[in-house]
Structures are given as structure tokens and as C-alpha cells.
Amino acid sequence: MLDRGVLHQAQARMEELTKPPRSLGYLEEVAVRLAAIQGKVKPELGRGAVVVAAADHGVVAEGVSAYPQEVTRQMVLNFLRGGAAINQFAQVADCAVYVLDVGVIGQLPDHPRLLKRKVREGTRNLAQEPALTREEAEKALLAGREAARWAIAQGATLLAAGDMGIGNTTAAAALTAALLGLPPEKVVGRGTGVGEEGLRRKREAVARALARLRPGMDPLEVAAEVGGLELLAIAGVYLEGHEAGLPLVLDGFPVTAGALLAWRLEPGVREHLFAGHLSREPGHLLALEAFGLRPLLDLDLALGEGTGAVLAMPLLRAAARILHMATFQEAGVSRGG
């Protein structure tokens, strides 16, 4: 929950700093919100952490992905070896990378940065049947919470989630459409690069999943129906991060879909969220608009893994430092008219 008193103090201080009013643009709004989250007029952000939640998807059987399912497990191994984009970006952004196996098909080796909390080996096919039971959905949510606690216990002051799961933009589109009441054609994109036929199959799969939804279903029931073990885990990451009082950074479409679920479960989560970037997926912009969030970066990214969120972390640290500037009075600088 934001500290409203500190929010007003930070806003007042912002007006007194040695710069023309609003000359640092949107970063000034970010700075003030960071102050309110931390309860300090001069916020401090240290090390970041990203929890990359990984799981497989039964909907891959519908031909909705440009990549084969085994890539999920192969990429998790790449994360653990430090060879992926998220590993490289995290090094320059002072961010620790944690990996959560919540539903990857196949076994993974023990690793100090891997939390094994596999609920099941991939979801059921959301186009044909409920992707998860409610119990499985609850377990995935709790796994995300546990992973966030692990990252926070290691000193994270800034928390993001990442995703890995071949087929997960289909699940993200279904979840986003269900939670926001949107038709498939508004939210379904090309993911990692499917062609026109693949795009048609994705839209059909999402439409079939949405057709099973019933009025009055609660958010967790909806999430179980349309799936995404890692999307539920991502919701858990943000719920736990909010409870711990941390600033929370969003990545692309699947991560933002998981955050939408967290928001539906706990409305206060919204106040702690920052949009790291805007991805190419059409549903991502619609989700950010629902949150009322402005992306810090717009770089045409479509990778996932938490890359856009981690790239935004230095910007958030820079925004926090704005409130450490001297005021006109403190610096002995004359004010303009």
C-alpha cells in the first residue's frame, strides 16, 4: 500500500528541485511513486531480481507455435548455464536471475538458481478441455509466491517476473481476453513468429477456451480453465512482491497476463507495478491500458524471459535518484519566474 503522506512530501520536494518543472518528464512520476512505495521521500533501489517461471503447454498440439515444445526445457538449461539474453541483460542491470520450474516437461538438473516446484508436466490442451484443475492452479500460484520469497530473502529490492514456455502467448491471450472481456482477434498475436495459418489456429484455440467460461467464475477458476502454469506462478510472484512492499516491474505479454490475474486477486498490486516495456503483441498494449501504466521502454521486443523488465531496472534506479537532487534553497540556486 502506498504511503500517501510520503507521496505528497515527495511531490512537494519534486517541485523544489534544481530543474525546470516537469523537465524530467515521466521519470518524475515514477520517482514519486517509488518514494510512496518505500515510504521514504528519498527512495533507494539496490539489487534487482527476476524470477523466470517456466512451464509447457498442451495447446502446442494445435500448431500455435513456431518452435517445438522441447525448446522450453532446452532454454531453461540455457538460463542455468548463463547463456540466454536474460542472463546477459541481468549482468549489466545488477539483477539476480532465479528460475522456477512449475511445469516443464522432463527432468531438470539440480542447480542453486533453480527452484523445482513442478505441478505437472505441462498443462492440458486449453483448446480442448480445462488446462488445469483449481488445485493445480493454486499450487502454481503458491510456487510463484515461494520463488519470490526466495529472491527477496537474497536481498532483492526490485522484483520482476520472466516467462519461458513454448505456446504461452496463446495461454496469455486467453487469460487476458477472459479477464478483460476482449475478443480473441484483439489479443492474439504472432508470438515468436507464426505465419497467417498459425495465427488463425491461435485465434481458434483461444476462442474455444473462452467459450467454456461461465458467468460468475472467480479469477482463479478462469485461470485454471485457460491455463498457463507459469502465468499463475507469475501472479504469485507479484502477489508476494506486493505483500513485501517492493516495486514490481512488468515484462511482456505473458508476464503482464499473470500480473492481471494478480491484480484481480489483490487490487492493491496495481500501485506497485511499473511497465518495463511495450512488446509487439497486440494484447500487451491493451493489458497495460487496463492497468493505466505507461511503458518505460518501447524497443520492439518480443522475447520474454523478463528481458524488458530487467532492461528497465537501471531507469527505475535513476528515477529514484531524482529525489536526491538538491533543492533550489539547498543549492543556493536562483529560481526562474
Image (spheres, helix red, strand yellow):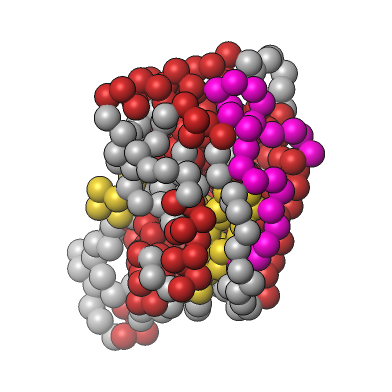
Q: Nearer the viewer, residue 124 or 54?
A: 124
Magenta segment boundaries in residue numbering? 114-135
Query: Residue 265: image x %, image y %?
Result: 68, 40
Task: Using the rendered image of the protein, determine whether residue 142 is visible from the camera's viewpoint.
Answer: yes
Majority secondary structure in the magenta region: loop
Q: Nearer the viewer, residue 83 or 251?
A: 83
Residue at position x 35%, y 51% from top? 303
Q: Give yes or no for residue 116 being in the magenta stretch.
A: yes
Q: Quadrant of residue 129?
A: top right
Side (left or right) of 179 relative to 310: right
Residue at position x 61%, y 77% from top? 112
Q: Nearer the viewer, residue 194 or 160?
A: 194
Query: Residue 279: image x %, image y %?
Result: 33, 45
Side (left or right) of 256 relative to 304: right
Q: Residue furthest right?
A: 135
Rendered position, 257 above or below 98: above
Residue at position x 71%, y 29% from top? 221
Task: Using the rendered image of the protein, determine whether residue 175 is visible from the camera's viewpoint.
Answer: no
Residue at position x 42%, y 43% from top? 68
Rendered position, 268 above or below 108: above
Query: Residue 144: image x %, image y %?
Result: 66, 55
Q: Nearer the viewer, residue 96 or 62?
A: 62
Q: Quadrant of residue 39?
A: bottom right
Q: Residue furthest left?
A: 337
Quadrant where the C terminus sits is bottom left
Rendered position, 112 above or below 298: below
Side (left or right) of 316 relative to 176: left
Disc tally is 0
Rendered position, 197 above or below 57: above
Quadrant where the N terminus sits is bottom right
Q: Give yes or no for residue 205 being in the magenta stretch.
A: no
